[in-house]
Amino acid sequence: MTAVRGYSALQRRRWARRLSGPGFETFGNIFGFVYTFLAGNVLLAAANAPLVFFLALVPDPVAAWPFFLALSVTVAPSLAGLFGAFQALNDDGSAVKPVKAFLVGYKRSFRRSALLGLGAVAVLLFLGVDLAIVQAMPAAAVLVPLIVLAAAVAVSLTVTAVAGVVLLPEARFKSLMKASLYLCVQRWYLSLAMLVLLEIIAAAALLQPVLGVAFAPAPLLFVVWSNAAYAFHAVLREA
């Protein structure tokens, strides 16, 4: 009987070591990622409910691009919330609470990220109107690529700045914008990768609004966030 009790205690200790070992920790980290991605997609859809609703309702969203561009003003604050959840995932691992982290990040960064979103929408609306006008001009072959490049820079700068707002909440807004512009130009390959990922998300949302928003954004935006965080940290180390 004593031997059985001793064997049981030994087994319990072995199981405890297994549960606290690298394998269980890896499983917990994977679960943390999956949970954060699923919760992040749901919270993104909720934060951008009008945009998602009309994307599912309107047959040709591209034809009504000014309307959908105006609705996308909510995207930047929701990105700040999602990036806050990613930062918490990096800090806490499997113990992360993505819903709470999203809401905290959304609230903490709302003022700056909303300003960034509003500015980006205004710039893209202006560039979109210009693009429609210059297409009929003789110099369209030169002006159209310039307008598209300016739009790409505006999007890249906005997303990078939103990441900076989450990473460096104490930084001055002007300094943050300068650093974001520097990163977009100096690490252009990361900006290009960001634009490709954002284009995939936009295409998924246009083709299948419900399924696209439910599954695509968070994993791809995690790559965007990771690249932006790496760029900011690299610049801080160099400084």
Image (cartoon, grey):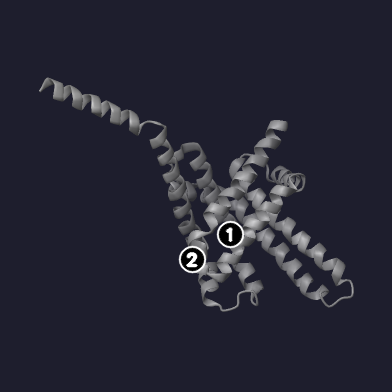
Tell me the SS state at disc 1. helix
Q: Position of residue 63 (x, y in %)?
A: 65, 77
Indicate left or right for 83 with 187 as reference.
left
Hey, which quadrant is residue 15 in on the image? top left
Please rate how many residues cluster around mark 2, counting C-alpha atoms within 10 Å: few if below 14, some from 14 to 19, many from 20.
Answer: few
Residue 20, relative to residue 118: is it above or below? above
Q: Residue at x 49, y 59 (%)?
A: 215
Residue 62, relative to residue 21: is it above or below? below
Q: Quadrant of the C terminus?
A: top right
Q: Residue at x 36, y 31 (%)?
A: 20
Tell me the SS state at disc 2. helix
Q: Position of residue 64 (x, y in %)?
A: 64, 76
Tell which of 93 and 157 is nearer to you.
93
Hey, which quadrant is residue 227 in on the image? top right
Query: Type of residue at label 1?
Result: Val
Q: Position of residue 232 (x, y in %)?
A: 67, 40
Tell which of 42 and 179 is nearer to you.
42
Q: Which mark is residue 210?
A: none
Q: Residue at x 79, y 64 (%)?
A: 147
Q: Residue at x 55, y 72 (%)?
A: 55
Please rate how many residues cluster around mark 1, counting C-alpha atoms within 10 Å: few if below 14, some from 14 to 19, many from 20.
Answer: many
Hey, which quadrant is residue 170 in on the image? top right
Indicate left or right for 129 with 89 as reference.
right
Query: Type of residue at label 2?
Result: Leu
Q: Which residue is mark 2?
A: 211
Q: Which mark is residue 75?
A: 1
Q: Give the mark nearer the N terminus: 2 vs 1.
A: 1
* CA distance for labels 2 and 1: 18 Å
Tell which of 198 and 52 is nearer to you.
198
